[in-house]
Amino acid sequence: MIVLFLVFPLVVHAQVNRSASQLAHENIQDYLKSKLFKDQPYYPESFGDLKPQKKDHSETAWIMEHKFQVAEKVDKGSVKPASMENHPYWFFFFLDKKMRVVKAESIQQ
């Protein structure tokens, strides 16, 4: 019984962190699909950890790294139709307390 009381808070805390990370993933994907890369196929590769961001007078509360690819049309100037090529991207996303994307910064690879 004592072990249960010791383990339960850890399990609850882990579940809350997992839920926050999942919400951040969903909001980042929505942001990419609706604002940055409209009407282009998006392929997520990896998400970093959700980390607290502490800065005075900033609406940013969290930061998350994300690597992904976006298929873009490539016109080679010939009679053939444009083909699609995947381009890799690496971004840091800054989120507010409600896990909404406030800003995104691209990192050069």
Image: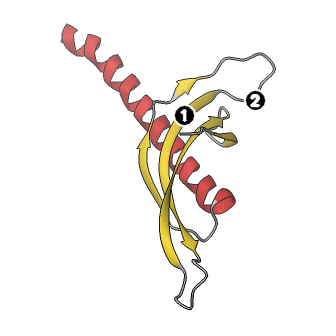
Query: Which SS class for mark 1?
Result: strand
Report helix, strand or loop for mark 2: loop
Query: Hey, which residue is sitting farthest top in the picture?
Result: 2
Name the residue furthest bottom.
Answer: 79
Viewer-closest of 3 and 86: 86
Residue 19 shown left or right of residue 8 in the figure: right
Q: Quadrant of residue 49?
A: top left
Whole-percent x, y for residue 61 in the image: 65, 27
When the figure is inspected, residue 44 is found, relative to residue 14, above or below; the finding is below
The residue most toward the right is: 57
Residue picked out by circle 2: 59
Where residue 106 appears, as percent x and y from the top left, is 63, 41
Q: Is residue 100 above or below residue 57?
A: below
In the picture, residue 79 is in which quadrant?
bottom right
**Which is more N-terminal, label 2 or label 1?**
2
Q: Amino acid at mark 1?
A: Met
Residue under the image location 49 percent in, 73 percent down: 84
Seen from the viewer's position, the closer of residues 11 and 75 is: 75
**Percent coordinates x, y for residue 81 in the rendering:** 53, 87
Residue that extends furthest to the front in the rendered view of this protein: 78
**How packed is label 2: few (under 14 Cα within 10 Å), some, or many (20 or more)?**
some
Looking at the picture, tell me which residue is in the foreground, 23 or 71. Answer: 71
The quarter of the image holding the N terminus is top left
Q: Which residue is mark 1?
A: 64
Foreground: disc 1 or disc 2: 1
Q: Vertically, is 108 above or below 38?
A: above
Mark 1, residues whose alpha carbon is within 10 Å: few (<14), some, or many (≥20)? many
Q: CA distance from mark 1 to mark 2?
A: 15 Å
**At x 50% / y 30%, what residue is drawn?**
50
